[in-house]
Amino acid sequence: MSELDDVLRCAGVRRTFGALRAVDGVDLAVAPGARHALIGPNGAGKSTLLRLIAGGQRVTSGRIWFDGREVTSDPEVSRARQGIGQTFQRSSLFRTLSVAENVALAVQRTRGRPWLPFPRRPGWAARVDEMLRLVGVEDRAHHRVDTLSYAECRQVEVAVALAAEPRILLLDEPAAGMSAAGTARLLELLRGLSAEITLLFVEHDLDMVFELATEVTVLHLGRVLMSGAPTEVQASEEVQRAYLGTGRRGELFTTVRSMGGDHVTPGT
Ligand SMILES: Nc1ncnc2c1ncn2[C@@H]1O[C@H](COP(=O)(O)OP(=O)(O)O)[C@@H](O)[C@H]1O
Ligand SMILES: [Mg+2]
């Protein structure tokens, strides 16, 4: 496959904060249909890289292409319209609206009528139902978001992101704070997504990474330490050495899950 076929490509992407090189010359190629994981210890630059790709922050230098078209200078909304979707670490849901209303608003935003009070066309309702079924929260359609569990909220956020019909979906630690059961549901949801949607996800739960990923990129101090098939990365002495050397092997190769069941995040 030629590099022109990549859904997403980063070349020499750099982002500094003062003297800190948060992302330090990253080359990244994401193939169509990939489940591409970004891993590395806290502070490696994973979230910053996702923001640079989505357009929430600008690169200091380097270039980014989406679908063969350069998007380096495009604003975030333009990139979203072109098909770069994302879920946010901080919830973007309207907590006093129902699940279906949240997804309906997202569908409406996508279909370009953001000024209408509420979507009323039958086609929209079908689309909302489809999104809810896809992420497995159809039985919660008419519940207010602030009555949902934390895991259910994350599922709804995926539905909201999918409503925008992205070609690539960026997920920043989608399983963070979830119980084992919540993580399993999320994994099932992501597994069930059409291959037409490419995934680029940051995840600390390495069981989830190695169950879902078709490709893994390891970031270390803002740089790509390694990129390859999951088995290659797991076997890599360089990866092991880097993390052993910094005493951070645990963060990379063990599972960290929250204790107890799903919980609701404090109101935001
Ligand atoms: N807005 C910002 N201002 C200053 N420093 C930042 C900002 N965002 C991130 N950083 C720093 O950049 C580095 C990478 O952060 P981040 O991308 O959040 O890493 P990760 O997601 O891998 O944990 C960290 O040292 C972090 O403190
Ligand atoms: Mg992060």
Image (cartoon, rainbow, N blue to C red):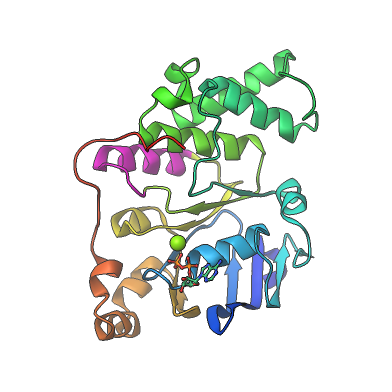
Q: Is residue 57 left or right of residue 37?
A: right
Task: Report if residue 184 lies within the magenta region.
Answer: yes
Q: Quadrant of the N terminus?
A: bottom right
Q: Which residues are magenta?
A: 176-192
Q: Is residue 218 above or below residue 32?
A: below
Q: Please name the residue shown 60% across and 69% down the image.
A: 29
Q: Is residue 6 above or below residue 167?
A: below
Q: Nearer the viewer, residue 40 or 268?
A: 268
Q: Please name the residue shown 38% across and 44% down the image.
A: 187
Q: Position of residue 128 (x, y in %)?
A: 61, 23
Predominant secondary structure in magenta?
A: helix
Q: Is residue 15 above or below residue 126?
A: below
Q: Nearer the viewer, residue 26 or 153?
A: 153
Q: Please name the residue shown 34% across and 34% down the image.
A: 264
Q: Is residue 20 left or right of residue 74?
A: left
Q: Position of residue 173 (x, y in %)?
A: 42, 53
Task: Report if residue 207 lies within the magenta region.
Answer: no
Q: Position of residue 86 (x, y in %)?
A: 58, 49
